């Protein structure tokens, strides 16, 4: 019954296509026209599919070009980092000698406020240089992250604790607000992840931010994103392509290590780093990290 109905509808369509009058000649013409119409539709569909595939191919080529460019940049950064690590080792011994002599001078003139002031400045400078040298040594190491299941809030708490010790909010006048999804678990090396978050927060404060916003949330089934937004100095559009390079910074006196280090940590975890900034002020940095899941647990066994 259904087949007969379908045949009737087809005959009706053919009749309408051929026009009134019927007859074998009209029917043959109708079927020929119907076939040509179907062929036109198929040709149009094939053309659209070809166009879609060409666009996808072009997108893949562009993505591959960008990936190859980034690989070359990372290889260059690795070579610089290796040389920097060797230099840092050489500089540390004389740096510790300077620190030791400064402390000796201070101990011999405890009642002289000027000597105490000078010694304090020397020691402050030594601490700053040592921090840069430590970062240079860290950059030169080829690390393999020790992955474990860690609560995102634990990573963020640890980074915030160090940040508050380095930059007391009462002195700097900055405020940090946090929004972290409940039960968000990361599959990361906790030490490296904490270091990356700390670098992002430091960058905001050193850019003159009074407000920092940190968000931790799921981004799909297997990824999580840690987003830090600030209202400090923006990054000029002309510098965005260079801002991740090792030792490059838009701020005078900055070491230019932080963002490069964060990107390296993200890459070590199979993640990514994305930046958005406005010249009139404010920067948004999104670090993608793996989320802990049942798949992560199976892969560790």
Image: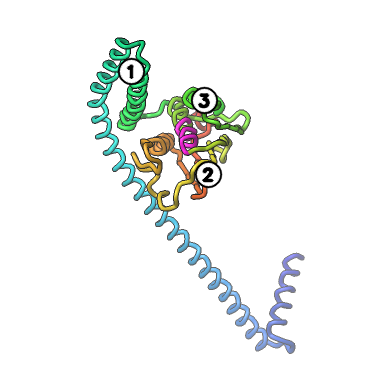
Magenta region: 198-207
Residue drawn where x is 27% and y is 30% of the image: 85
Give the position of the N terminus as an image quadrant: bottom right
**Badge nearest the viewer, 3 or 2:** 3
Q: How crowded is mark 2: few (under 14 residues within 10 Å), some or many (20 or more)?
A: many
Q: Is residue 9 left or right of residue 34?
A: right
Question: Distance between the Cα atoms at labels 2 and 1?
Answer: 41 Å
Quadrant of residue 267 within the rendered picture? top left
The residue at the point 53 percent across, 73 percent down is 43
Mark 1 closeness class: few <14, some 14–19, many ≥20 residues within 10 Å: some
Circle on res. 115: 1
Numbered circle sitting on residue 33: none
Which callout, 2 or 1, points to the residue nearer the camera? Answer: 1
Q: Nearer the viewer, residue 279 or 149?
A: 279
**Label 1 vs 3, first from the N-terminus:** 1
The rendered magenta stretch, by its main secondary structure, is classed as helix
* Residue 168, numbered circle: 3
Disc 1 to disc 3: CB gap under 8 Å: no
Residue 115 can be seen, yes or no: yes
Please tell me how crowded label 3 is: few (under 14), some (14-19), or many (20+) other residues with Cα within 10 Å: few
Helix, strand or loop status at disc 1: helix
Numbered badge on residue 282: 2
């Amino acid at each position: 019954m259904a087949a007969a109905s379908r045949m009737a509808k087809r005959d009706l369509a053919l009749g309408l296509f051929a026009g009134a009058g019927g007859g074998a000649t009209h029917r043959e013409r109708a079927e020929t026209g119907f076939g040509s119409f179907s062929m036109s539709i198929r040709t149009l569909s094939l053309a659209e599919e070809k166009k879609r595939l060409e666009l996808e191919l072009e997108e893949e080529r562009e993505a591959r070009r960008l990936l190859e460019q980034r690989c070359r940049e990372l290889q260059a950064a690795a070579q610089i980092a290796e040389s920097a690590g060797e230099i840092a080792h050489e500089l540390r011994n004389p740096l510790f000698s300077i620190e030791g002599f400064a402390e000796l001078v201070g101990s011999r003139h405890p009642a002289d406020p000027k000597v105490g002031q000078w010694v304090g400045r020397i020691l402050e400078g030594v601490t700053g240089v040592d921090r840069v040298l430590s970062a240079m040594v860290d950059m030169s190491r080829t690390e393999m992250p020790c992955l474990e299941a860690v609560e995102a809030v634990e990573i963020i708490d640890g980074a915030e604790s160090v940040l508050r010790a380095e930059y007391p909010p009462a002195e700097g006048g900055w405020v940090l607000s946090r929004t972290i999804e409940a039960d968000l678990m990361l599959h990361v090396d906790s030490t490296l992840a904490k270091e990356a978050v700390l670098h992002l927060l430091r960058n905001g404060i050193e850019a003159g931010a009074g407000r920092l916003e940190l968000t931790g949330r799921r981004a799909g089934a297997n990824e999580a994103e840690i987003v830090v937004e600030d209202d400090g100095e923006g990054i000029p559009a002309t510098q965005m392509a260079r801002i991740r390079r090792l030792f490059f910074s838009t701020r005078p006196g900055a070491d230019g290590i932080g963002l490069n280090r964060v990107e390296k940590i993200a890459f070590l975890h199979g993640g990514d780093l994305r930046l958005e900034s406005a010249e009139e002020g404010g920067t948004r940095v999104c670090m993608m990290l793996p989320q802990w899941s049942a798949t992560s647990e199976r892969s560790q066994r």
